[in-house]
Structure formats: structure tokens, C-alpha cells
Amino acid sequence: MRHLFAAIVLLLSAAPLAAADLRIDPVRSRAEFSVRLLWVSNVSGAFEGIRGDVSIDHAAQTAVVRADIDTESIRMESARLRRWVLAPEFFDAVHYPTIHFESLPTPLMLLTHGGDVAGKLTLRGITQPVTFHLQGNRCPTESLAGCILQLQGMIDRTDFEMRGRRGALSDRVNLGMAIVLEAP
């Protein structure tokens, strides 16, 4: 029995070494989107409500990024455009108040050197695989608090049942996130 108790204590004391979490700073982080309008200009907006975390598995040398974006937090150049993108034909914020991204386990070295981050994006209640490109930064993998993860990607809005105004809007939507990490 004493050996079993010692083994449990050893496992519990080693558990914090296997995974460490960082938070996404909701004040300094942002998410943006843009979509081409009539092949001449872009409709764009910035989301002010982004939160989430990064779970780090030091044993596997991987990290998982989870981010939730409050759809209603979008800021745009005009109130009319804001009402339109929150309406059912685009984000449908009443029924789907959150956009969610979760990466697949990503090598820690990629967080500093940059590269492609695969994951899943849930938008309008539909989950699709996505790949974002992560820009490299100078943060050491041992200490990511204070680092900024900048991700850029593109989705096809029809994959998320956003089919309105197809003659006027491009199907391709650019998405970007600048995530500032902080200790919990």
C-alpha cells in the first residue's frame, strides 16, 4: 500500500510538468476578417472579444491553441455593414454568438519558427478543417508568456453555409488573429 501511495504522489507531482497552460490576453489580442466586395474593395472588420488558451505538453513538445471569438464584438467602418455581417446571411450572431478555433497538436518549435497550423474552425455551428499560417517570432519555447502568435488564413464562406450575395461578395474570406499569450 505504501508503494501505491508513493507512486500516486509521484504521478501527481509530475503532472504539472506534462502540461502547462497560457491564456490568450483578451485585451491585447484581436481577430480580423476581410472579404472582397464587387472585385473592387474589401469589407473588413475586427473582433474585440477574443479569449482562449494554449495548452503545452512538454513531454510531447506540442501545443494546442484554442480561441473563442465573440461574434457581437465586431467593429466595422459603418453601423449598416456591422448589422449586415451580424445578420443571418453572414455570421448569424443571434444563433451563433461564438466562432471557435482549435488547433491540432502543433510542434512547439513551430510556435517560434513559424509554419502551418492545422485545426478546426467552427462558424455558424459548422466545423471545418482549416490551416492558418503562423508567422515566426523570437520567443523561446520554454517561455511563451508575452509572445504574440500571428496567424493568417483563408476560408471559403460557402463551406459554412454563407451563400448570400454571391454575385457581389467573393466566396474567399481572409481571417487573421494576433494572439498575445500571458500566464494564467
Image (cartoon, grey):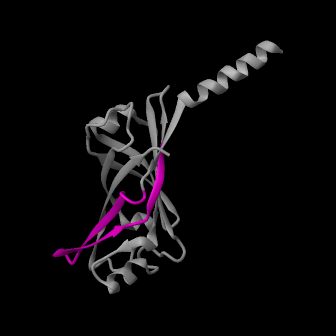
- Can you name the residue that lies furthest to the right here? 1
Q: Nearer the viewer, residue 111 or 116?
A: 111
Q: Judge whether residue 29 is colored magenta.
A: yes
Where's the N terminus, which quadrant? top right
Residue drawn at 54 percent across, 29 percent down: 18
User: Against 103, is 163 above or below?
Assistant: below
**Res 72 seen here:** yes
User: Against 16, is 167 above or below?
Assistant: below
User: Against 131, is 98 above or below?
Assistant: below
- Can you name the residue that lies furthest to the bottom here? 80
Q: Nearer the viewer, residue 19 or 118?
A: 19
How many dots with numbers? 0
Q: Position of residue 104 (x, y in %)?
A: 46, 42
Tell me the chief SS of the magenta region.
strand
Task: Kindly indicate the quadrant of the structure image that contains residue 3.
Answer: top right
Task: Kindly indicate the quadrant of the structure image that contains residue 145.
Answer: top left
Q: Is 99 placed left or right of 7 in the picture?
A: left
Q: Is 137 placed left or right of 93 in the picture?
A: left
- Can you name the residue that lies furthest to the left here? 40
Residue drawn at 50 percent across, 65 percent down: 98
**Res 67 seen here:** no
Task: Kindly indicate the quadrant of the structure image that contains residue 177.
Answer: bottom left
Residue drawn at 77 percent across, 19 percent down: 5
Q: Nearer the viewer, residue 112 or 167?
A: 112
Q: Is 139 placed left or right of 24 in the picture?
A: left
Residue drawn at 78 percent across, 17 percent down: 4
Q: Position of residue 156 (x, y in %)?
A: 35, 63
User: Against 70, is 55 above or below?
Assistant: above
Q: Position of residue 97 (x, y in %)?
A: 51, 70
Q: Position of residue 94 (x, y in %)?
A: 52, 77
Magenta region, residue range: 26-54
Q: Judge whether residue 28 is colored magenta.
A: yes
